[in-house]
Amino acid sequence: QVCIFASFSCVGTPFRHGRPGGVRVSLEAADALGPGPAPAAAAAMAMERARGDPAEAIRNDLERTFADMPMVAPRKPQISRILQQYANQNPEVGYTQGMNYVAATMCLKFPDREAEASRLFAEAMLQFSGLWSDGFPLLSFGVQLFSALAERHLPSLWTHLLRSGVEPLSYLPNGWLSLFGKWLPLPAVMETVDLVLDCGIRGVLAATLAFFQIQQSRLLAAQGMEELLELINQDSRTAPIDGELVVNCARRWLPHVDEALQASSGAG
């Protein structure tokens, strides 16, 4: 597991895009879709509007949140309070599946400082609101940039994924809506979230590219859509992926992300 790029610092202003909306995205539904529908259709099928009191949805989702990690169970009341408070204070957003992983990460980073965990959770929700708002502007924008970067810098893996029928909308929502909680082992998530909050969408893209670079040999050895999606969306959470490696590698991807952002801005 090595990163091939020269070292760069994380600099610049986080990219903020989109206004909060009331879209609920079911990550479990996305997992269950498997290799059936086309990617765009699969993404649409996995999305539904949040309705009514979010308390039941929060309660149900917390049963599945890092369920294999014993340290999470004692923090569930704290996680629930943060999610419920946010939903009550931001009714135009409400509760969206994926937020449970973000809130859990913050609570584990600050186990005895609930106010700080709640503040950082709200900051993440503000910064990445475009992942959930109407039309999914930040998701669409991020997918476009990731595709260009992966095609240019990870050409063998990119070609392998596409030839196997695995397109970005088959996996990116799963990782991004949980801020990597559905992709990385919990300790690695807790390290990566700092970079993501510092760098915004730049950090999300850089960490995603780092994840795929680190996992490249495993993914190239996998055959077929089903095996690849299982590796990306499920098995990677239990893989021995080191958080420090992800963060260091992501920092080295940042200049390439910035270059792509500048090119996108110039084209627009």
Image: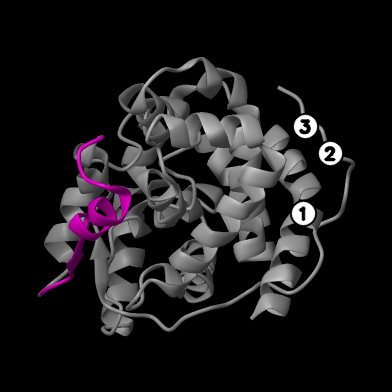
Q: Residue at x 24, y 51 (%)?
A: 42
Q: Residue 77 or 165: which is nearer the viewer?
A: 165
SS assignment at label 2: loop
Name the side, left or right, on which 262 lies relative to 45: right
The coloring applied to the image is one colour
- Spot occupied by residue 72 in the image (x, y as percentages of width and height): 37, 40
**Residue 203 visible in this rendered orientation of the protein:** yes
Q: CA distance from mark 1 to mark 2?
A: 10 Å
- Spot occupied by residue 116 in the image (x, y as percentages of width and height): 54, 66
Q: Label 3: how many residues lie within 10 Å, few (<14), some (14-19) or many (20+)? A: some
Looking at the rendered structure, the kind of residue marked 2 is: Phe
Membership of 49 in magenta stretch: yes
Q: Residue at x 47, y 33 (%)?
A: 161
Q: Residue at x 54, y 54 (%)?
A: 110
Report which residue position mark 2 lands on: 5
Say above or below: 14 vs 177.
Answer: below
Quarter holding the C terminus is bottom right
Q: Residue 47 or 190: which is nearer the viewer?
A: 47
Report which residue position mark 1 lands on: 256
Counting residues from the start of the chain, the first of labels 1 and 2 encountered is 2
Looking at the rendered structure, the kind of residue marked 1 is: His
- Spot occupied by residue 154 in the image (x, y as percentages of width and height): 66, 37
Tag 1 near tag 2, CB within 8 Å = yes
Membership of 183 in magenta stretch: no
Q: Residue at x 58, y 53 (%)?
A: 146
- Quadrant in the picture for residue 87: bottom left
Q: Which mark is residue 3?
A: 3
Q: CA distance from mark 1 to mark 3?
A: 14 Å
Q: Residue 185 or 62: which is nearer the viewer?
A: 185
**Highlighted magenta segment, given as a residue range:** 35-51
Tag 3 near tag 2, CB within 8 Å = yes
Say above or below: 259 vs 167.
Answer: below
